[in-house]
Amino acid sequence: MKAYRILTISGDGIGPEVTAGGKAVLEAVARKYTLDFQFEEALLGHVAIEATGNPLPDETLEKAQNSDAILFGAIGHPKYDNDPSLKVRPEQGLLKIRKELGLYTNIRPIKLFDELIGASSLKPEILKGSDILFFRELTGGVYFGQPRERSADGETAFDTMIYSKSEVRRIAHKAFQAAQKRRKILHSVDKANVLASSRLWRETVTEVAQDYPDVKVRHTFVDAASMMLIKNPKQFDVVLTGNLFGDILTDEASQIAGSMGMLASASVGDKTGIYEPIHGSAPDIAGKNLANPLASILSVALMLEIAFDLKEPANQVIKAVEKTLKAGWRTTDIADKSTESDKILGTKEMGTLVAEML
Ligand code: NAD
């Protein structure tokens, strides 16, 4: 029997709580389909700094390189958010592992489960039928550009927003190929009226588009895109954008799906991929059994499909989530305040229930 080596990196804050749900579902999949999933664990982020002084210990990177897929939770701790002078920071670990594994494409599906229409602050008629696939560039742009410095007198600081044509080209091809299998509309989001890197982005996407004449391309400025996303989300099919804009727009788009706790993602590239919720470590609810584990569970579905080509088990995971929601079970973030019929569960219980539904 083929063995699948899965590394779990649960990280900080709610990371371990939600990743436990994802792992419970993977174990249920293994039982249902008689699959051999072999699990290992590793440290990243604040917990890794506490244990080793390094946000990405060598041992974690080595385990990551030797695994077939990685289930990641979240990193981050208020200690660093409130003290910008700290030189060693949890997010350095996450950025480094993405770079080392060559994970330049972050795929973020924004799909609203019908049962959650009441959980969003947007009007049902605006939301219904929304189905967007984001392609966020993950290893370039202003998050990685050098130099990035604070001046000697501490009065100024700068970052470098840089893209090369090859970086834009490789993710653009992936986004166009996905659009061909969907509604064949691709919004490329940039800020080409102001930024030189965005003008290069737009020019390169236009060149790549020649290879996909069946896909309609709409170049959109990021400020307009942020407005259009909540005004009329149904106009979007595939959205292709850079690292910073994708980070911001997908947090906004999480409200289309009802909560940050619903959005899964796949970070893929040349080697082992990382499957991860889009949310952070949520220190405000960490350790309280309040976090929604469905983003981690839906990341498991992406792992099964993309990393292992196990389409049927992946669909069954999504169906199990759907069934759980249909039966009225909710974590607090997706509860419909206007109805009494929702049944509220904690993080752990939600994970167990979805695993049982499978
Ligand atoms: P966040 O995503 O952690 O939380 C934003 C809001 O969404 C909070 O109110 C939180 O309670 C809520 N939320 C997030 N996930 C939820 C879930 N699964 N269920 C229910 N509610 C959920 O963003 P933040 O507060 O801006 O950042 C907190 C920390 O996380 C920071 O240290 C930041 O650097 C880090 N961060 C990490 C990642 C990552 O690991 N990929 C991503 C973003 C932020």
Image (tube, helix red, strand yellow):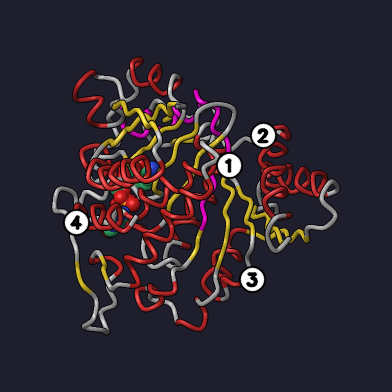
Badge 2 is on which residue?
Answer: 167
Q: Residue at x 43, y 29 (%)?
A: 4
Q: Nearer the viewer, mark 2 or mark 4?
A: 4
Q: Secondary structure at mark 1?
A: strand
- Give how far across and how far down residue 114 sits, in percent: 44, 74
Q: Amino acid at mark 2?
A: Glu
Looking at the rendered structure, the kind of residue marked 3 is Gln
**Residue 336's spot in the image, x, y percent?**
29, 77
Q: Is ligand 1 within 8 Å of the beta carbon of the residue shown at mark 1? A: no
Q: Which mark is residue 349?
A: 4
What is the distance, in whole Å, between disc 1 and disc 3 at their CAs?
21 Å
The mark closer to the camera, 3 or 2, is 3
Q: Quadrant of residue 165?
A: top right
- Tell me if label 2 and label 1 are in contact, CB under 8 Å: yes
Residue linked to disc 1: 137
The mark nearer the N terminus, 2 or 4, is 2
- Give the CA separation, mark 3 to mark 2: 27 Å
Instruction: Indicate whether 34 appears above or below 205.
Output: above
Q: Is tag 1's residue or tag 3's residue first in the polypeptide sequence?
A: 1
The stretch of residues the image draws in magenta is 87-109
Q: Does 261 sit above or below residue 161? A: below
